[in-house]
Amino acid sequence: MFTSCKTCDWALVHSDGVPPHDIAVKATNDRLISLVDAGLMRYIRGDVPLQDMLDLAYSEMRYTIVSYLKCESCGRTRFWGLCIRGAPIYKVVKESDPDRWNWEAVPPREQWARS
């Protein structure tokens, strides 16, 4: 049964776009960073740190960029994914999903980072 969570559900920020393109990417990413920094969510694994996701996406050197996080309030695992030609995704997934993801190498940071 679905239960709402004031922590991990709050991280998702909507824009005025039409679903599935109605996620405010920067605002959602910033909230996730804040929640991790506050110890309310835990970064499990990702292609790059949350702070680098947008730069890698803007570089278009990777088609998809993903992160997995665990909410310390409700215990759910969240998938946060960006796709350079698709809609962002923020959803609840199985706890085992980070171990089953097909992780691929990321180009060296100096090739895509803005600073």
Image (cartoon, rainbow, N blue to C red):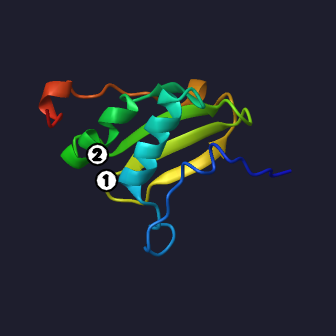
Q: How many marks?
A: 2
Q: CA distance from mark 2 to mark 1?
A: 6 Å
Q: Residue at x 15, y 37 (%)?
A: 114
Dot 2 falls on a residue whose secondary structure is helix
Residue 5 position within the rendered picture, expressed as x and y whole percent measured from the top left: 71, 47
Tag 1 residue:
84
Contact check, label 2 and label 1, Cβ < 8 Å: yes
Q: Residues within 10 Å of mark 2 (few under 14, many from 20)?
A: some
Across and down, in percent, residue 104 comes to 38, 28
Label 1, residues with CA under 10 Å away: few <14, some 14-19, many ≥20: some
Q: Residue at x 67, y 29 (%)?
A: 72
Give the position of the C terminus as an image quadrant: top left
> Which residue is pictured at 31% across the width and 53% down the height?
84
Q: Nearer the viewer, residue 91 or 38?
A: 38
Instruction: Give the mark nearest the N terminus, 2 or 1.
Output: 2
On the picture, is 46 further left or further right than 97? left
The kind of residue on which mark 2 rests is Ala
Which residue is label 2 attached to?
57
Q: Is residue 43 above or below residue 84?
A: above
Residue at (40%, 44%) from the top-left corner? 30
Q: Residue 100: x and y, percent?
A: 59, 28
Looking at this view, is 93 or 54 the one in front? 54
The quadrant where residue 77 appears: top right
SS under mark 1: loop
Image side of residue 102 versus residue 76, left or right: left
